[in-house]
Image (spheres, rainbow, N blue to C red):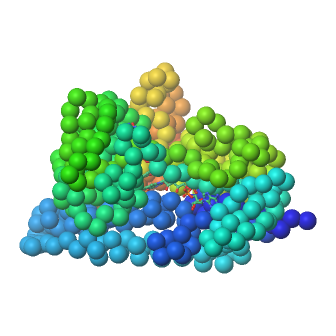
Amino acid sequence: MTDYNVIVIGAGPAGYVAAIRCAQLGMKTACIDKWLNLEGQASLGGTCLNVGCIPSKALLDSSHHYYFLQKEAITHGIQCDNVKLDIATMQARKEGVVKTLTQGIAGLFKKNKVTSITGTAKLIANKQITITTPDGQQQTISADNIIIATGSTPVQIPIAPFDNEFILDSTGALNLTKIPERLGVIGAGAIGLELGSVWNRLGSKVTILEALPDFLSMADRKIATLAQRELKKQGLTINLNAQVTSTNIINNEVVISYSDKSLTVDKLIVAVGRKPHTDNLNAAEIGIKIDERGFIQVNAQRQTAIDGIYAVGDVIGGPMLAHKGSEEGVMVAELIAGQKSEMSYATVPFVVYTHPEIAWVGKTEQQLKLDKIEYKLGQFPFAASGRARANGDINGIVRVIADVKTDNILGVHIFGNNASELITEAVVAMELEASAEDLARTIHAHPTLSEAIHEAALGVDGGMIHA
Ligand code: FAD
Ligand code: NAD
């Protein structure tokens, strides 16, 4: 007789969602997580809530208000002389948001009768887990099924090891209490662009060094070009093709050598990706297969090499995104409960929360060209949108790409204010295998930013009205 039907290891967006869904489906469920906040208290929600999605968006929002008041409010007839920054209050607000939401997960666990256990889990044979609590106590519990959702941690590169005083990982970059005059960032990915934007808006001179020759290589080329141009206008220096060869801390400054050039900054953020987190889990030792990059290998049902042990979220690779992990968590919970469940990786949306935001779903033009798929394209600029004009935020475009023969939507790419919200319409349309005509014949409220998607869909067959 086991202690639980399901034990979930990790309470990030993959694990906590899996645990709640398991409990909803009538399974006796426990979720083990080791995260402690700076006050030494258990803090559920994993990377996303504690040091990822949520605190970064809190700072993006605060820094955008500051930027708006300084640079844009005047165009609305609002004079904001002497706008002052109180970084301590800004950081305290961010921490407050994190605390509310992490405590919210604890509340959801209670409501759904998930047993929450604070401690570090180690897998042992026969679906048993040893838990070491923060005060060093140990206990062993067992389950019929185990879901591993242990997430990921920042990649460290040997030429720029984190000291979290001068060379920062993403957590250090979220917690600065003073605005660095000069800030370097290695990596122009989601973290580099988002946190680079935060500190640029707050007054740092930000230089981003990206190894690849293309800016945001995964994004649609036209969107990437527009975004790069706009971020440059906002003051970010983005150097592509930058091969960093060394970093040295000299007299409280970081001297970075890259591609025969040199850059001196006060702080350096290294944001070159994240790696799966399986340290001390004992996964390989009990027979779970791990690939050469450290990701846990799973089959289509997200089951590992051991019957009844599943893995979801960042630790299995694919897009390292909170919503991807959460959907996997739901799917595995339902499969364990004996239901039919699957998720569609083709419609996972991607968002970069710069201003304007960059968001997309489905294929890019460049992918379609490579795959030799014939497509048609409609695109609409926000400059022609009544709502964007009224908002005073007219940067960007929407691009809708559809199959030449079937008219099915193959991809939607947005650079614009609120793209993170707008993209959901495209995700739903693609999930339901809609055609561009379906979107074009759908009534959109006026005046809204979503009319830009409507117009771009109309544009697929040359029927755009407002541009
Ligand atoms: P995690 O969130 O990493 O959670 C894993 C949990 O497992 C942790 O709480 C950890 O303590 C626990 N754990 C690990 N090992 C053990 C063990 N042995 N015993 C007990 N507990 C253990 N994604 C988005 O979709 N949108 C965003 O806007 C976004 N912004 C981000 C901003 C930043 C700065 C960062 C760093 C990431 C961001 N991400 C974003 C990525 C997102 O945070 C991750 O994709 C997501 O958190 C992965 O969820 P997960 O549940 O797989 O793992
Ligand atoms: P990333 O993979 O998004 O970007 C890393 C960038 O660093 C890439 O452009 C890569 O080419 C570059 N790079 C790698 N090695 C380099 C080197 N030695 N020198 C210079 N450049 C180098 O990774 P990230 O920005 O660290 O984010 C980590 C993960 O967190 C990602 O998987 C991302 O999806 C997720 N995340 C998502 C969001 C979001 O959804 N808005 C926000 C933040 C983080």
Residues 209 and 120: in front is 120
The image quarter containing residue 72 is bottom left
Counting the numbered discs, the total is 0
> Is any part of residue 19 visible from this angle?
no
In screen coordinates, is 411 left or right of 35? left
Q: Residue at x 83, y 59 (%)?
A: 144
* 146 w.r.t. 33: above or below: above
The image quarter containing residue 198 is bottom left
> Is any part of residue 293 visible from this angle?
yes
Residues 297 and 373: in front is 297
Residues 258 and 22: in front is 258
Residues 411 and 57: in front is 57
Image-quarter location of ligand 2: top left
Looking at this view, name the residue that lies furthest to the right: 1
Query: Residue 412 at x, y = what percent?
Result: 43, 42
Q: Residue at x 33, y 43 (%)?
A: 186
* 110 w.r.t. 411: above or below: below
In screen coordinates, is 250 left or right of 424? left
Query: Residue 269 at x, y = what percent?
Result: 33, 50
Q: Quadrant of the C terminus?
A: top left
In screen coordinates, is 160 left or right of 442? left
Query: Residue 172 at x, y = what percent?
Result: 37, 59
Q: Residue at x 52, y 45 (%)?
A: 275
* 415 w.r.t. 6: above or below: above
